[in-house]
Image (spheres, rainbow, N blue to C red):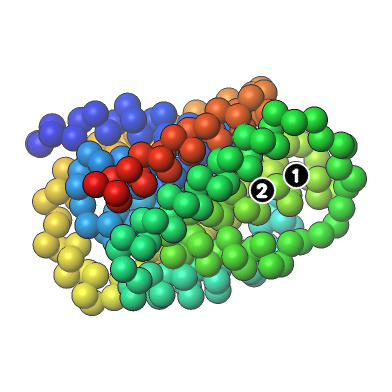
Amino acid sequence: MDFTYWYLFPIGIIISILAMTSGISGANFWIPVYLFFIGLNPKIVFWLALLTMLFGFGSGVIRNIYQGTVNWYIVKQYLILTVPAAVVGSLLASYVNEKVLIFIFSFFIFIYGTYQFIASITSQKAKVKHQKVFWKVGIIAGFLKGLIATGLGKLIVPGMWNHERIEHPSEVIGSAVVIIFIVDIVAALTRMNPVFVNELIDNRTVLMSVLIFVLPSVVIGGHIGPQIIRNADVNRLKIFISLTLIFVSILICSRLLT
């Protein structure tokens, strides 16, 4: 057994907990980890982030269903939008330059992190309950998930917070986790063209050495996260996540410039 990447086990637990408690994809954190520490081809990195999240979010899905924190009406409405859009984004990803994909990823999480931080530290008026399903946002979110393996949870969660069918904040996160899990499956499978599969085979030794530590870690974190969110201070959590995303985006951009 190769212990080269043993450190990914504790990192994986932390990342999975962050993803489960915020409702955003853990790909935001796995992509820089795989880029900086493993040094894989960026397109493999995006796919590997999707695969990793399947196990982490799969664990989270089970836990949220058990807790009863999934609103299936919300899940169904957003899947209708996000799944086809994710297929389009995944197909397009094969034709986009690797550095361009990394730049889009880093730029997106910087903008989102900054917006979320500002929104969290400023006073906001109480929002009125609504019945809306944000179609345009859902389509863009699904497309980004397919293209850069992230963007889904970040974009759809804000519109879910005040939906009249949501009875508790934990239902927003639980529903987002289910949506992200299903769309991740679609995005990961759509990327599996013959050329890409050959790249995976060529890198199979490294991939297996990585996954042997990553997969159990995200399963563990996926079970712990849903329990934490039930008692978490949501606003403080958003501030922490937003600052982390800004930091990650700066790190990635610095790499592109070197």
Q: Residue at x 17, y 70 (%)?
A: 198
42 relative to 246 in the view: left or right = left
Query: How far from the left and from the top, in percent, is residue 86?
Result: 50, 68
How packed mark 1 is, by other alpha carbons closer than 10 Å (few <14, some 14-19, many 20 or more), is: many
The amino acid at mark 2 is Val
Query: How far from the left and from the top, in percent, is residue 27?
Result: 42, 47
Quarter of the image with the N terminus is top left
| Label 2 residue SS | helix
Q: Residue at x 48, y 33 (%)?
A: 244
226 relative to 51 in the view: left or right = right
How packed mark 2 is, by other alpha carbons closer than 10 Å (few <14, some 14-19, many 20 or more), is: some
Say which of 172 and 34 sits in front: 34
200 relative to 245 in the view: left or right = left
Work out whether residue 249 can be spotted.
yes
Vertical placement of 247 versus 193: above or below? above
Residue indicated by mark 2: 157
Work out whether residue 67 can be spotted.
no
Q: Residue at x 28, y 57 (%)?
A: 42
| Label 1 residue SS | loop
Query: How far from the left and from the top, in percent, is residue 131?
Result: 85, 57
Say which of 27 and 77 sits in front: 27
Vertical placement of 244 versus 202: above or below? above
Q: Residue at x 41, y 40 (%)?
A: 250
Say which of 242 and 25 sits in front: 242
Vertical placement of 95 versus 169: above or below? below
Q: CA distance from mark 1 to mark 2?
A: 7 Å
Q: Are marks 1 and 2 in contact (CB under 8 Å)?
A: yes
Q: Quadrant of residue 233?
A: top right
Residue indicated by mark 1: 161
